[in-house]
């Protein structure tokens, strides 16, 4: 379930970009 960490990281990156 390590991919959940990647999803959180991606959401953070998207928030910063937007």
Image (cartoon, grey):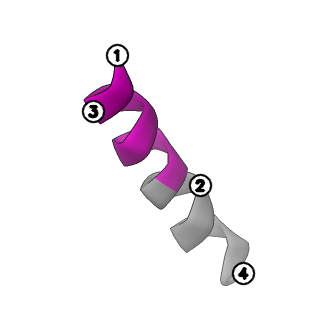
- Residue segment shown in magenta: 10-18
Query: Could you tell me which quadrant the N terminus lies in?
Result: bottom right
Q: Element type at marker 2?
A: helix
Q: Element type at marker 1?
A: loop
Between 4 and 15, the residue placed more toward the observer is 15
Label the magenta part by its dominant secondary structure: helix
Give the percent coordinates (x, y) of residue 4.
Answer: 62, 66
Give above or below for 18 relative to 15: above
How crowded is the residue under tag 1: few (<14 C-alpha within 10 Å), some, or many (20+)? few
Horizontal relation, residue 3 to residue 18: left or right: right
The image's mark for residue 1 is 4
Query: Which of pointers 3 and 4 indicates the residue nearer the eye?
Result: 3
Pointer 1 with pointer 3, Cβ within 8 A: yes
Q: Which residue is mark 1?
A: 18
The image's mark for residue 16 is 3
Query: Which of pointers 1 and 2 indicates the residue nearer the eye?
Result: 1
Precedes in sequence: disc 3 or disc 2: 2
The residue lying at 45 percent from left, 59 percent from top is 9
């Amino acid at each position: 379930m390590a991919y959940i960490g990647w999803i959180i990281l991606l959401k953070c990156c998207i928030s910063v970009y937007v």
